[in-house]
Image (cartoon, rainbow, N blue to C red):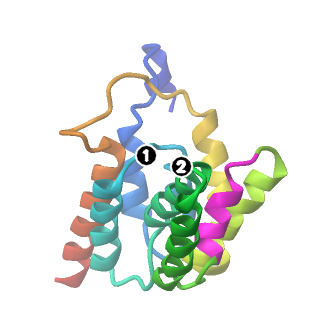
Amino acid sequence: MAASTANGKGLPPEALGVVAGVLEGAYGGLATGGLWDRRFGWKEALFSTLGWMGLGMTGGNLPLALWVGRGVVALWERRGWWTVLAVLVFALSGLLFRGLWLAPLGVVLTQRTGWVRVVGQAMAGVAVYGPAGLLVPLGAWVADQLPLSHGPSSFRSMDRPMLLYGFTALFKAMLTKS
């Protein structure tokens, strides 16, 4: 860690994606929680889910929950008929996760501040990982404390840490299955 901050640049955010992919599995909540504040779209959610499925994990993964939950909030804020669509997306998204609606509900709660945000992170983590998901808020907090270098973090409109998370998880699955 000292070497990463000695030059003043800090740890590249891509390192979080690699660590999350390597540690993904039953106790991956701590590392994947470090990716909590990343901004990504459907491509990143899809690619990370492929890594998750490659590992043989059941239900949806945390990045998918983040994408769905944030999408529900964005639709809800548009008001009008978008509210109906937000409720429909929320209702259908629960079927993607082991913890049913707990994962997207947790993500919706994280749009608040303070303890409600932490409780929302824990809810989403538990819905995805089971009891080990209580480590997700800790991972998000640790990532907030790390000195991360700032700069462009996209690869053909794909978030690099999330791309590396999915690739590393798939590579880990290939190595462990053979």
For this view, does 155 lie left or right of residue 125? left
Mark 2, residue position: 34
Magenta span dominant secondary structure: helix
- Quarter holding the C terminus is bottom left
Eyeballing the image, is 42 above or below 4?
A: below
What is the x, y in percent for residue 42? 33, 57
Q: Residue at x 26, y 75 (%)?
A: 173
Eyeballing the image, is 92 above or below 117?
A: below
* Snapshot quadrant of residue 60: bottom left
For this view, does 151 lie left or right of residue 73? left
The magenta region covers 102-112
What is the x, y in percent for residue 127? 61, 77
Q: Nearer the viewer, residue 54 or 157?
A: 157
Q: Are marks 2 and 1 in contact (CB under 8 Å)?
A: yes
Q: Amino acid at mark 2?
A: Gly
Q: In the rendered structure, find residue 3 and report the number of the disc placed on it.
A: none
Mark 1, residue position: 16
What is the x, y in percent for residue 44? 32, 55
Q: Residue at x 61, y 49 (%)?
A: 77
Magenta span has 107?
yes
For this view, does 54 lie left or right of residue 2? left
Q: Amino acid at mark 1?
A: Leu
Instruction: Determine whether the residue tagged by mark 1 lies in a helix, strand or loop.
Output: helix
- Say whether residue 94 is visible: yes
